[in-house]
Amino acid sequence: MNIVIETVDSVRVLRFARPERRNAITAAMYAALADALEQAAKDSAVRVVVVAGSENAFTAGNDLSDFLEAPPSRDDAPVFRFLRAIASFPKPLVASVCGPAIGVGTTMLLHCDLVYAGENATLSLPFVHLGLCPEAASSLLLPAVVGYQRAAEKLLLGEPFGAAEAKEIGIVNRVLPAGEVEAFALAQAAKLASRPMSSLIATKSLMKRSFTDAVREQMVEEGRYFARMLGEPAAREAFRAFLEKRPADFSKIEP
């Protein structure tokens, strides 16, 4: 299985474990993540969840080959189940991020409560490069977190940025040497797990309350755009270019 689930006392760790593809996420992996989050939300023995990769890669985002074979077309598609599960997860959620965090690898961090990154972390939001639009309500949450102009730069240009900048603009809490990130994230998770669960859940719920309905609605709206754009010429050219290992050419594609 490419998602490894471990439990350390009352901390549940969900780990991307597909090193040969830099932890690129398949539909089966999304399903496993959604199942694990839904189960952890209900399990009173689980007090905190940590999402992690390895010291070299958090996740390269969607596995595009897998994505093209079975694009998400229904509301119950694994990727949409995962996004709803992470957005609504009621307990503390901590991320340990090293290496590439591409696409959903960055947008999922906007739903985490604490994010710790390695000095080698590289975040990117290449949706426009793929002829698509943002997902995970990132078109709402990123401007709220970093400000509109910074969000526009990250989403419209889609250029990678490092851990230090991610901390500066508010996506990451702390930057550490890559070899120290997971241990630190687990230590922080253990601190959270020692706090009263009812207080943690209430505090998280209150902080997110003003965004809860808006996030749900934005995900639906993004999904509509995303599904439509998948069949349009820009996305077809972007995916062909990816598979053919060449730069995409959008010059002849009209808006």
Image (cartoon, rainbow, N blue to C red):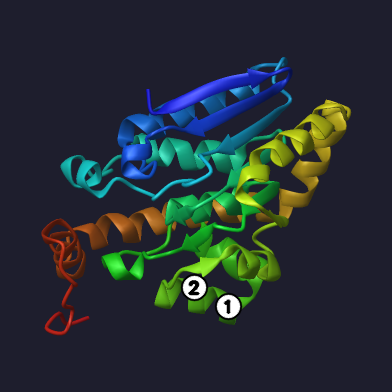
Q: In the rendered structure, find residue 214 and report the number of the disc placed on it.
A: none
* SS assignment at label 2: helix
Q: Is residue 6 above or below residue 167?
A: above
Q: Residues within 10 Å of mark 1 (few under 14, many from 20)?
A: some
Q: Is residue 135 above or below residue 125?
A: above
> Which three-letter amino acid code belongs to the residue tagged 1?
Arg
Is the residue 94 above or below the residue 106 in the image?
above
Q: Is residue 4 left or right of residue 76?
A: right
Where disc 1 sits, the SS reads helix
- Residue 156 point in image, percent of width and height: 42, 76
The answer to whether any part of residue 136 appears in the image is no
Q: Is disc 2 in contact with disc 1, using a CB cutoff of under 8 Å?
A: yes
Residue at the spot 44% in from the left edge and 64% down from the top edge: 125
The answer to which of 20 and 208 lies nearer the viewer is 20
- Locate the C terminus and report the quarter of the image it occupies: bottom left
Q: Tell me if mark 2 has few (under 14), some (14-19) or many (20+) residues whose alpha carbon lies within 10 angstroms of its own.
A: some
Q: CA distance from mark 2 to mark 1?
A: 6 Å
Task: Please state which of residues 79 and 15 is positioned toward the viewer in this rendering.
Answer: 15
Kind of residue at badge 2: Lys
Q: Total label count?
A: 2
Q: Quadrant for residue 234, please give it.
A: bottom left
Q: Quadrant of residue 8?
A: top right
The disc placed on residue 154 is 2
Residue at the spot 48% in from the left edge and 47% down from the top edge: 56
Residue 86 in the figure: left or right of residue 1: right
User: Which residue is denoted by mark 1 in the rendering?
Assistant: 150
**Residue 79 location, x and y as percent?**
38, 40
